[in-house]
Amino acid sequence: MNISSVDLNLLVAFDALMGERNVTRAARRVGLTQPSMSNALSRLRALFDDELFVRSGRGMEPTARAQSLAPLVGDALRRIEQALAPALPFSPLDIDRVLRLAMTDNSMAVLLVDLVEQLRMEAPKLDMHVLSSRPTGMLAMLDDGEIDLAVGVASELETRHRSQPLYTDRLVGVARRGRFGPDGPSLEAFCAAEHVLVAPRNGTGGTIDRALAARGLQRRVLLTVPQFVFAPYMVAKADLVACLPARIALAKAELLDLEIFEPPVDMPEFTVSLIWHGRDDEDPAHRFLRETIAAVAERVTALGNDPLHDMCRPRSGERGFACFAQAQAHPNDTASTPGPVASEEDETRTGDRVPAE
């Protein structure tokens, strides 16, 4: 049966007749005249090819067909009423769902602990499922409804996608403390060192290697790893050199006794953004989650004013500033947490793209 050819008001009449078992009372219940309800009953009988209601000493009794229809029609009408009802005032306390969030290991390191703590307080019924990007990238995951939000480097977005910048970061060099001294390495010393390359997409080179190649130089990449979190430990334990996002460098320098230096080649800055699909723009729960993630990111990525943090601050292309600082403790800073970052390997998909070292 083609539902577009059915007068759905007949279902309202059927529900009233089922409840009242009397044409006059059923008409009064839905605001119709008695003749109009009688006409609706005739049309219902024709629609279902059944008497539906038959007279008895107690009024009108439903047939077996009417009894089988009653729960289905009643449930359908209740669902329509719910759909048409005014939206209830939104409260994070009422969010009872799973937040599916795609993040790199870097964005997990900078945001996840504080985000979980914040959401646990504000939306205690909310559960989180954090996913890695699939090979086709985070945008495809958003399009397919596989995730609700993504945290990464937004570029080449389609009109259906939205993004909100969370913070800007930059790459800095890290080495065992005392290896290069207060002025950092010369270009020759930098190339002569053994490096660990972070390549999330399993590449074999990155922006540093291209910059060196343009000068006719190259470096030795002794080790390539897919995640940033492991690289500082290799620097400390195997006496390697790495170029890492400033917030990861700051977070690990004191713990692992590392020095931070300005690389002798230009390093790109990058902006980590929150990315979502436009279909979720007006969803109150989704809006709350976006605002919460943005607020957490602003709080945990704020850099302090001491020389070490100033050296790691994004420079928007500025060069020639003091580029080396010994690691020191910053107990009053909220920025001692690593963040979603760029890597040298930049052959990655939009939505989780990170320029590699």
Image (cartoon, grey):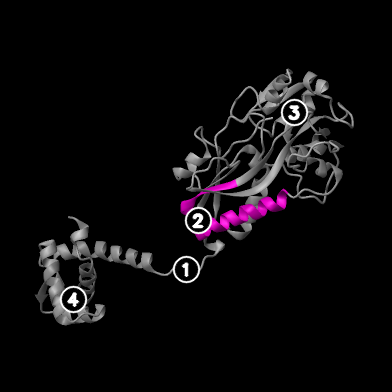
Instruction: Give whichever of discs 4 and 1 has the lower sequence position.
Output: 4
Q: Going from the N terminus, do you reach mark 1 or mark 2 first?
A: 1
User: Which residue is disc 1 drawn over?
Assistant: 88
- Of badges 3 and 2, the one in the foreground is 2
Quarter that holds the N terminus: bottom left
Q: CA gap, disc 4 to disc 1? A: 34 Å
Q: Which residue is mark 4?
A: 21
Q: Secondary structure at mark 4?
A: loop
In percent of width and height, residue 198 lies at 67, 29
Location of residue 24 (image quadrant): bottom left
Residue designated by label 2? 281
* Circles 2 and 4: CB atoms closer than 8 Å: no
Bounds of the magenta segment: 274-301
- Considering depth in this image, is 236 or 207 the residue closer to the camera? 207
Kind of element beneath mark 2: loop
| Front of the two marks 1 and 3 | 3
Of the two numbered discs 3 and 2 on the same chain, state the one appearing first in sequence: 3
Q: Cβ–Cβ below 8 Å for labels 3 and 2? A: no
**Coordinates of residue 112 in the picture (x, y in percent):** 64, 46
